[in-house]
């Protein structure tokens, strides 16, 4: 497989260098952070020299058409190749949207696949650490990842760190209005607090009645 | 080669530009727009005119050749010599002298690329498009667009104000010769940034130089209105000389537009210089007389500049894309809202 990949790239890069992306699969991610969730869009642009590799991964029945099922399946595979954690806890990625170019556009090196996804952020303290990893098509990928300036003024980015290839991205931020070590209580707010209180009172009442019944059994 | 022909046209346009310099900028541009429109027939006028709020046309630009990403409007190739001359006079009226020269050099680079690629029909000066959004007016906002491969000028004119964001410039080849003279359309962008990098001390360089690779523009076509977190060295940690050098790099984009709009823009950017960041990724050396092979970004509250050499199978110093944005004022939306 490795030899085949190298041969394909060599063959296609032997053509004159024109205006299009050639032997890389540009995977550019823009991340935005909110208090309760993160959203991201990843734009994947296969170069003309590597598009056959990418296309083979998308058009799995090789009929020359990227069907809705194949689009969904590929978007799912991309998401599975991504990893996201918040404060060390893994997050489940949800596909929001996907857009695929035509095969002709991909052949020309200008086809862009766009995948939008989100993840609910588990409740945490005032200091948060989000780690994003991208391992999709790592042998041909050129990764890029950036964070948009948060719209929420309560969120302040403290640091961004990446490895050289940008396959690993770490974001540290502060979140105002959140107390540390209040993980449980933080998840209970508004109506949910009252519902919880009512449930606790009902539970106590039933427990009390059950104990009374146990002490004074009814005989028939 | 066609480059000689375009040099003659540049002189002609420059002459009409000088003659019109006495007029205030906006009336000069409006006159040039009306003069251009008067050379067109009804069908051509329909092709070149768009509604001011036509969001599709606004964003119909790219670094890629027009055969890959089609543009709308009128291409230079479908105009007569007189119409073409009027079109270029309009473009030059909205730009500074150096700005127009840069545009000519980018177009000439594409003509050179066409020649180098065996007369490849994908490239060349005939494939640059002009369009007008709205009605040319000295008071009401309207837009002039000019672009093709490696060029996208989006100029919003609102009264005496002129906004050039978003604008894409690029060059391939980034170095070529015309009549024995070496031309580097984006040479100053490269040289000035490299000089700034070398003017930094070790501590500053450590902050400015990013530890990761950047393969392309982050906020290229299709990324309107997005603001990423700034990185690198903040200008508040520079000395006066270094800050002046940074402003000089910025001026290579801010001064493309006509002089009075450029002066207003430079005043705005100078006032925010301490909030402006400079980041570098890639080689920190350069072959004398050539462009850098490194990426750099300059980012402030109302500014994003990216310089991104392209590793598209060749020498990255010979193929450059750059982006100039004000994420808060793409297509002059702040001016148009007033």
Image (tube, coloured by chain):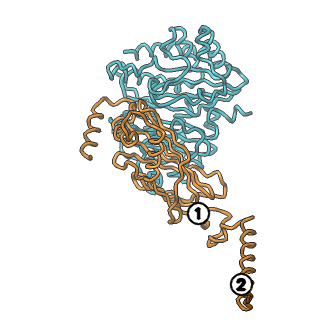
Chain colours: A orange, B cyan
The residue that appears at 39% across and 51% down in the rendered structure is A165
Name the residue tied to disc 1.
Answer: A122
Residue situated in front as seen by the camera: B309 or B117: B117
Q: Chain of mark 1?
A: A
State the image coordinates of residue A8 (x, y, percent, origin top left). 28, 38
Secondary structure of the residue carrying numbered label 1:
loop
B206 vs B88, left or right, is left
The residue that appears at 37% across and 33% down in the rendered structure is B318
Res A65 quadrant in image: top left
State the image coordinates of residue A164 (x, y, percent, origin top left). 39, 53
The residue that appears at 38% across and 43% down in the rendered structure is A57
Compared with A150, B220 (above or below) is above
Secondary structure of the residue carrying numbered label 2:
helix
Residue situated in front as seen by the camera: B239 or A11: A11
Res B332 quadrant in image: top right
Q: Is residue B125 visible?
A: yes
Residue B36's disc is none
Residue situated in front as seen by the camera: B267 or B76: B76
Q: Nearer the viewer, mark 1 or mark 2?
A: 2
A34 vs A28, left or right, is right
What is the C-alpha distance between the residues marked 1 and 2? 37 Å
The residue that appears at 54% across and 44% down in the rendered structure is A97
């Amino acid at each position: 497989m490795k030899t085949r990949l190298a041969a394909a790239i060599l063959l296609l890069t032997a053509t004159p260098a024109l205006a299009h992306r050639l032997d890389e699969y540009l995977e550019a991610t823009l991340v935005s952070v909110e208090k309760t969730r993160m959203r991201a869009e990843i734009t994947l642009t296969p170069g003309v020299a590597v598009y056959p590799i990418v296309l083979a991964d998308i058009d799995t029945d090789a009929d020359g058409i990227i069907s809705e099922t194949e689009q969904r399946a590929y978007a799912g595979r991309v998401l599975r190749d991504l990893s996201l954690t918040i404060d060390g806890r893994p997050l489940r990625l949800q596909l929001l949207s996907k857009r695929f170019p035509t095969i002709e556009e991909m052949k020309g090196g200008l086809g862009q696949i766009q995948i939008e996804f989100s993840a609910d952020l588990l409740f945490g303290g005032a200091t948060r650490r989000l780690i994003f990893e991208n391992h999709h098509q790592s042998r041909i990928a050129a990764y890029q990842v950036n964070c948009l300036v948060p719209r929420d003024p309560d969120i302040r980015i403290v640091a961004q760190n990446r490895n050289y290839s940008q396959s690993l991205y770490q974001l540290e931020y502060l979140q105002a209005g959140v107390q540390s070590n209040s993980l449980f209580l933080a998840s209970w707010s508004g109506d949910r607090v009252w519902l919880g209180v009512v449930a606790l009172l009902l539970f106590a009442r039933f427990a009390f009645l059950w104990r009374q019944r146990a002490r004074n059994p009814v005989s028939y | 080669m066609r480059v000689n022909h375009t040099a003659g046209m540049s002189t002609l346009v420059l002459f009409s530009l000088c003659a019109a310099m006495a007029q205030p900028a906006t009336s000069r541009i409006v006159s040039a727009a009306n003069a251009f429109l008067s050379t067109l027939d009804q069908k051509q006028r329909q092709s070149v005119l768009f509604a001011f709020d036509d969001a599709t046309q606004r964003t119909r630009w790219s670094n890629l050749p027009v055969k890959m990403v089609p543009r709308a409007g009128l291409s230079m190739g479908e105009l007569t010599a007189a119409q073409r001359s009027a079109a270029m006079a309009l473009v030059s009226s909205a730009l500074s002298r150096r700005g127009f020269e840069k545009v000519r050099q980018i177009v000439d680079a594409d003509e050179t690329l066409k020649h180098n690629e065996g007369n490849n029909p994908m490239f060349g000066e005939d494939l640059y498009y002009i369009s007008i959004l709205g009605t040319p007016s000295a008071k009401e906002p309207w837009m002039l667009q000019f672009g093709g491969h490696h060029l996208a000028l989006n100029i919003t004119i609102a009264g005496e104000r002129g906004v050039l964001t978003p604008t894409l410039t690029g060059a391939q080849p980034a170095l070529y010769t015309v009549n024995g003279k070496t031309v580097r359309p984006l040479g100053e962008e490269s040289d000035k940034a490299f000089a700034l990098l070398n003017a930094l001390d070790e501590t500053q360089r450590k902050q400015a130089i990013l530890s990761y690779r950047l393969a392309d523009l982050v906020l290229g076509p299709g990324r309107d209105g997005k603001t990423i977190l700034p990185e690198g060295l903040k200008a508040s940690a520079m000395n006066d000389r270094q800050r002046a050098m940074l402003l000089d790099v910025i001026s290579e984009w801010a001064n493309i537009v006509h002089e009075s709009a450029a002066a207003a823009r430079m005043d705005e950017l100078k006032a925010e210089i301490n909030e402006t960041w400079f980041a570098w990724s890639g080689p920190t050396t350069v072959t004398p007389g050539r462009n850098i092979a490194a990426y750099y970004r300059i980012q402030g509250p109302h500014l994003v500049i990216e310089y991104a050499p392209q590793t598209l199978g060749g020498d990255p110093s010979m193929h450059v894309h750059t982006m100039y944005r004000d994420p808060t004022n793409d297509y002059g939306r702040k001016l148009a809202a007033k």
